[in-house]
Image (cartoon, rainbow, N blue to C red):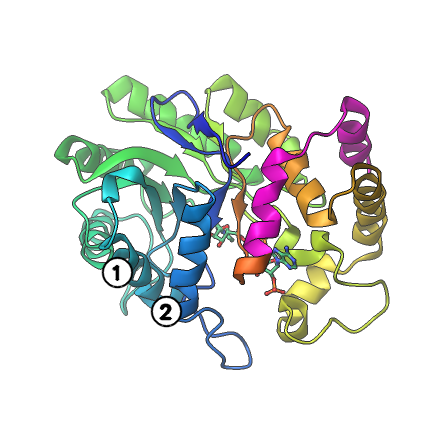
Amino acid sequence: MGLDAVSLGRTGLRVSEVAFGTWRFGRENDAGEVEVGRERAHELLDAYADAGGRFIDTADMYGSGRAEQYIGEWLAGRDRDEYVVASKIYWPTREGPNGRGLNRKHLRNNVDAILDRLDTDYLDVLYIHRWDDRTPAREFMRTLDEFVRDGKVHYLGASTFEPNAWKVAKANEIARREGYEPFTVVQPRYNAVNREIEATYLDMCRDYDLGVVPWSPLAGGFLTGKYARGEVPPEGTRGATDQQFVDSYLTPENFDALEEVEAVAEEVGATPAQVSLSWLLHHEQVVAPITGARTPDQLRENLAAADLTLSADQFERIADAK
Ligand SMILES: NC(=O)c1ccc[n+]([C@@H]2O[C@H](COP(=O)([O-])OP(=O)(O)OC[C@H]3O[C@@H](n4cnc5c(N)ncnc54)[C@H](OP(=O)(O)O)[C@@H]3O)[C@@H](O)[C@H]2O)c1
């Protein structure tokens, strides 16, 4: 019972098999409400840690820096070294043309700001949050390598997806040629209804031995089964306040795939959320899905997915559903 430790790709670092994502910490939704304030954030982190969770995912822009701040305050009362904390840089965090992207000025500025907010000397994993076509890969790979040499960052990751598979490969070839630290982990979107990385990205990851840490493992909540075909999203859900979510997730094809997830859930006596997470946990290339629960109850439900076993047939049926 509880969360096991797994290797982060080919690195020597061990992480929890389910990571906890903090995107909603300090974030205002379209209705102007803070989705997860400080107190709730600390309750969620407590619930995750109580279940044995040690792999926390954040980014410099989550809640305009508040997510990292909440995590830093929470970590202050704990043994920092027990936790693996990952953050990301790319999206704008200050005004001006250099306040975004992967240029050296922005990267150096932000890595220090991240360490300040988290109140820590080092980050376990630093991801590029997206690919930056304006900055040469050689420039940012060299800057990222500097962070590893300085001990500010331990491992490098790329949070990019399908069309950029070849770019990640190119960056790692540059790193190999120049003796820089390569990317050893990637963070793409992946779940039972968002399968775009199956085109070429996963092949690239296999070839470069990159650990895959998927975001939105429940398709933002769609795979929990709380949305019904043709019905208005329930109050208080992401679907109720986010039209983009409704347009991209509440589609006929997704509801068809969800039916297969629900059928398997019935067979194994689990919830659709648990089966969806378990499907990723059974995937040979997945290191740790990042669950994005908004309440401690949701989180406890999701973490119990680690104890679930799917048969090969059940795995394949979900794989074939979309
Ligand atoms: N690298 C990137 O570009 C990127 C992008 C997105 C996310 N991420 C990372 O991945 C993490 C997870 O992403 P995500 O929030 O989209 O993940 P997700 O797990 O697919 O969706 C989380 C949402 O699903 C609903 N939910 C979760 N568990 C539930 C349950 N048991 N019952 C009912 N509803 C449940 C909640 O929505 P309601 O609000 O409706 O309750 C919650 O906000 C983020 O926190 C972040 O760390 C990274």
Say if the magenta span includes residue 170. no
**Badge number at residue 126:** none
Regarding mark 2 in the picture, which secondary structure is present there?
helix
Q: What residue type is disc 1 on?
A: Glu
Q: Which residue is mark 2?
A: 38
Q: Is residue 62 above or below residue 89?
A: below
Q: What stretch of residues is rendered in magenta?
A: 298-322
Overall secondary structure of the magenta stretch?
Answer: helix
Regarding mark 1 in the picture, which secondary structure is present there?
helix
Q: What is the residue that sits farthest to the left in this orientation? A: 150
Residue 292 percent across, percent down from the top left: 53, 54
Q: Quadrant of ligand 1?
A: bottom right
Query: Do the residues under discs 2 and 1 have CB atoms within 8 angstroms?
Result: yes
Residue 44 percent across, percent down from the top left: 45, 58
Q: What residue type is disc 2 on?
A: Arg
Q: Is residue 283 above or below residue 43?
A: above
What's the distance in space between the residues labelled 2 and 1, CA to CA? 9 Å
Identity of the residue drawn at 39% across and 46% down? 56
Residue 47 percent across, percent down from the top left: 46, 53
Residue closer to the observer: 196 or 153: 153
Identity of the residue drawn at 84% across and 38% down? 267
**Which of the two discs, 2 and 1, labels the residue nearer the N terminus?**
2
Q: Which residue is mark 1?
A: 73
Residue 30 percent across, percent down from the top left: 55, 77
Say if the magenta span includes residue 316. yes
Give residue 303's quadrant in the image: top right
Rate crowding at label 1 as few (under 14), some (14 to 19) or many (20 or more) other CA atoms within 10 Å: some
Q: Is residue 158 visible?
A: yes
Q: Quadrant of the C terminus?
A: top right
